[in-house]
Image (spheres, grey):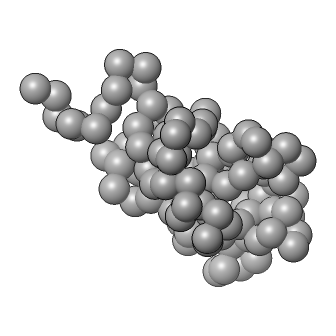
Amino acid sequence: PTANPTARADGFQPVGTVADLDRKGQILNKRLASGPVLVIRNPDDTNSLAAVNPTCTHKGCTVAWKTNKKLFVCPCHDAEFAVDGKVVEGPAKKPLPTYQAKIEGDAVLVKV
Ligand code: FES
């Protein structure tokens, strides 16, 4: 038995469904032991996914994906991050950590 029954041999863990992803435009999952993950479809290639730790590197608010801006935006002090986690607009200075993510069947999987 493992500590996390959903962990797979390849290290990917399910964080939601494709239906969720397409309904909300993003999946925010806070149930993984390793911390929160936010998954989106890559705006430049919607067949691929992008995933970040959405904890803002400024003071720890949770960023959200803004489809119209194609950026992760922090609700607290308006820091902006690109799809690859890099800072576009301060006050944050450090990038968001990124993860590999993929779709298998109807499951959205992230390697954390
Ligand atoms: Fe995100 Fe300040 S906590 S910009």
Decide if residue 99 is in sight here.
no
Residue extending furthest toward the left:
1
Residue extending furthest toward the front:
105
Q: Compare residues 103 and 99 and report the one nearer the observer.
A: 103
Name the residue located 87 percent from the left edge and 73 percent from the top edge: 68
Q: Quadrant of residue 69?
A: bottom right
Left/right of residue 5 with respect to residue 22 in the rendered view:
left
Residue extending furthest toward the top:
9
Name the residue located 34 percent from the left edge and 56 percent from the top edge: 31
Q: Compare residues 103 and 97 and report the one nearer the observer.
A: 103
Q: Compare residues 74 and 110 and report the one nearer the observer.
A: 110
From the top left corner, tell me how far across and down residue 12 is, in percent. Answer: 45, 31
Left/right of residue 44 with respect to residue 51 in the rendered view:
right
Q: Compare residues 53 and 95 and report the one nearer the observer.
A: 53
Name the residue located 41 percent from the left edge and 43 percent from the top edge: 14
From the top left corner, tell me how far across and down residue 21 is, in percent. Answer: 59, 60
From the top left corner, tell me how far across and down residue 30 is, in percent. Answer: 40, 59
